[in-house]
Image: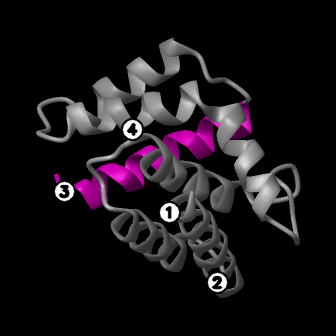
Amino acid sequence: MTRTEARELLMQLLFQMEIQQDYSDKIKQQYLEEHFAGSGQTPFAKELLQAVTENLSQIDETINRYSTKRDTSRMAKVDLAIVRLALGEVLYMDQIPDPVAINEAVDMAKKYSADESRKFINGILGQIVKNKNAE
């Protein structure tokens, strides 16, 4: 399994958790066991999932601060999952270069979302990284 595949699986989990409004440890553990068992990406997946779920309110605040067109409550759930995942990497995982996180998010948006969403995701992540690096 590649990191790209791991990100896609985690995005799907975040989507599922948002739809069900269930962010419990039980659902996370079960999903990791089912999809990452024996994978070399398990440590990466656990770290990224933890970064996103433990910092969800801060991630959503950041999205809402930079999104002028739609806030998290009005975003498509797939787009929200993609942006949350990317921000988990950008804001909380220093070993992942920001351009890699953005590129992976845009590629996921190309695969799972509308063309308009891809542009939105690229734009909002670009703004956040630009301002993060300026601080």
Residue tagged by mark 3? 2
Residue 99 horizontal/vertical position (percent):
38, 71
Q: Which numbered disc flags the more N-terminal residue, 1 or 2? A: 2
- The answer to whether 33 appears left or right of 122 in the picture is left
Q: Magenta residues, as a range?
A: 1-20
- Main SS of the magenta segment? helix
| Residue at the disc numbered 2 | 119
Q: Residue furthest front?
A: 135
Residue 104 drawn at (x, y percent): 39, 68
Mark on residue 133? 1
Toward which corner of the image does residue 116 lie, by quadrant?
bottom right
Residue 119 inside the magenta-drawn segment: no
Q: Does 88 appear above or below 133?
A: above
Query: Residues under labels 4 and 2: Cα distance?
Result: 24 Å
Q: Which structural element holds mark 3?
A: loop
* Front position among marks 1 and 2: 1
